Amino acid sequence: KWYVLGAGNNTLFTQDYDGVLLTPVSASRTVLSDDGEYVDVRVEAAHDWDEFVAWSVDNDLWGVENLSAIPSSVGAAPVQNIGAYGAEGKDLIDTVETVEIATAKVKVFRNEECGYAYRESVFKKDLKGNFVVTYVTYKLSKHPVFNLEYGNIRTRLEKTGKEVSLRLVRDVIIEVRKEKLPDPAVQGNAGSFFMNPVIAKEQYQELLVKYPDMPHYVVDENRVKVPAGWLIERSGWK
């Protein structure tokens, strides 16, 4: 019996684990290519996720800034398809390198082979327990790619009175996250494990009559996403 435990930020043990815990420790980061438009960065599984985001911002590389302050290791990111504030890991991942448990052979998954969906991947379902992630290669932009429409990020940025920059976006994201979630290094917690429900546009319009302040984000012409946080607050369960 075995289980891969990365940083362990989304895991709360209620009793001893009856088996072997495998924890990645290698945490290198290597720039593979730079074509003037994009930079490919290969990162080992144990690398702290937010340290990778900070490094990207310090080097003027766009794409991961909206995923700031997510407590995770890089190896866990492609399994969960981590996301926050309108950004998802799947939009930046080029390849995921793994070791197959049954054969001990290396297998590289291209992005399109990972079965990515909202907080979903083949590593969570069909291939769960079959592979251990060793490296993830990310494709980051050298040119500004603003992603500010989710939640109140744009409003927060405007309130600063400063020109929008990569560093400012990261700082605002961190500020908002600190208000919403406790730091797992201070208070043990499983983070935000709620998924925002996606509903039919017609259903949203019906609900809007009763709840005119109900926020939403357009998924496509037929569906919208309703923030789980808003639903929890309105239910009185926060």
Image (spheres, grey):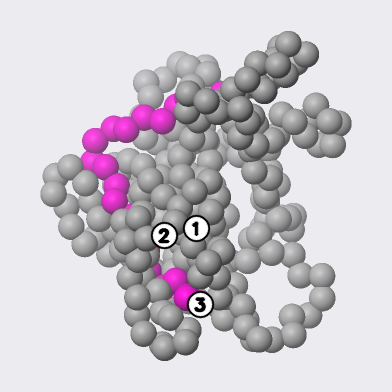
Asked if the stretch drawn in magenta spans residue 74, the answer is no
Q: Are marks 1 and 2 in contact (CB under 8 Å)?
A: yes
Q: Position of residue 219 (x, y in %)?
A: 50, 30
Compare marks 2 and 3 and give the one earlier in the sequence.
2
How far apart are the alpha carbons under marks 3 and 1? 13 Å
Amino acid type at mark 2: Cys
Magenta residues (range): 130-152
**Residue 170 relative to residue 146: left or right:** right
Q: Position of residue 210 (x, y in %)?
A: 78, 13
At x 47%, y 76%, the residue is 131
Report which residue position mark 2 lands on.
Answer: 114
Residue 54 visible to an observer of this rendering: no
Task: Tell me which corner region of the image, top left, top right, bottom left or bottom right, holds residue 135.
Answer: bottom left
Label 3 crowd bin: few (<14), some (14–19), many (20+), radius 10 Å: few
How far apart are the alpha carbons under marks 1 and 2? 6 Å
Q: Residue furthest right?
A: 236
